[in-house]
């Protein structure tokens, strides 16, 4: 009864809200600030530069290690590899073995052996002071045997393969040992090859 007699308070009207014509859609917020993008870009470029520097340094160090290998050590290793990995391919064996010996003489004597035919190669070493007549004969026999296998498809027995490898190894060792010998005592010409005699 008492509540019914109490005066009622009027609720004031709500203030006017913002106009709906100013309402816009959601605003896209970029995941990164411009300064963050700049830092990430700089770090990426730095990492790429370090990677390029590391690769360049690795290649150079590898080249230096390759150059540091003595020619006779490299040639002996190539001959051993040729004998070990071409057991069923005589032609491949002959190619790799002759290349190993040619490359050795090119590096040790400066003769472009890889660009010459067998006859030209033997002729260029004809008067070399570090090759005596015995070594010259052995070299001629080695190259002619390799050519017969490469071009005439001749086959090689296990004993012949071993003999060729041993002959090439001995040629390299004799050439290296001649460094300490007076050239005047070994300056004998190579005997003529079969090709020269036939010509």
Image (tube, rainbow, N blue to C red):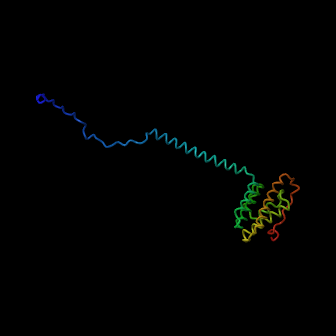
Q: Is residue 26 left or right of residue 72?
A: left
- Front residue of 106/81: it is 81
Q: Is residue 41 left or right of residue 154?
A: left
Q: Residue lying furthest front in this view?
A: 1
Figure quadrant of residue 132: bottom right
What residue is shown at x 70% (from left), y 62% (from top)?
Answer: 85
Q: In which quadrant will I find the C terminus?
A: bottom right
Residue 146 on image: x %, y %: 75, 66
What residue is shown at x 83% (from left), y 66% (from top)?
Answer: 192
Figure quadrant of residue 2: top left
What residue is shown at x 82% (from left), y 63% (from top)?
Answer: 138
- Front residue of 131/174: it is 174
Whether 197 is drawn above or below 15: the answer is below
Residue 7 on image: x %, y %: 13, 28
Residue 66 on image: x %, y %: 70, 51
- Front residue of 168/175: it is 168
Q: Is residue 75 left or right of residue 42?
A: right
Whether 11 is drawn above or below 150: the answer is above
């Amino acid at each position: 009864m008492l509540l019914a007699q109490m005066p009622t308070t009027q609720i004031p009207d709500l203030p006017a809200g913002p106009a709906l014509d100013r309402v816009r859609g959601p605003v896209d917020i970029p995941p990164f600030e411009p300064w963050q993008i700049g830092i990430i870009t700089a770090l990426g470029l730095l990492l790429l530069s370090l990677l390029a520097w590391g690769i360049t340094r690795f290649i150079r160090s590898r080249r230096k290690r390759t150059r540091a290998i003595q020619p006779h050590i490299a040639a002996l290793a190539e001959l051993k590899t040729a004998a070990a990995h071409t057991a069923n391919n005589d032609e491949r064996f002959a190619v790799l073995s002759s290349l190993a010996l040619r490359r050795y003489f090119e590096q040790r004597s400066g003769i472009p052996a890889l660009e010459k035919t067998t006859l030209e190669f033997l002729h260029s070493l004809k008067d070399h002071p570090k090759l005596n007549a015995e070594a010259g004969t052995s070299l001629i026999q080695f190259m002619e045997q390799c050519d017969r296998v490469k071009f005439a498809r001749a086959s090689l027995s296990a004993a012949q393969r071993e003999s060729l490898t041993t002959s090439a190894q001995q040629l390299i060792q004799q050439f290296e040992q001649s460094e300490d010998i007076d050239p005047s005592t070994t300056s004998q010409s190579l005997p003529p090859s079969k090709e020269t005699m036939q010509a």
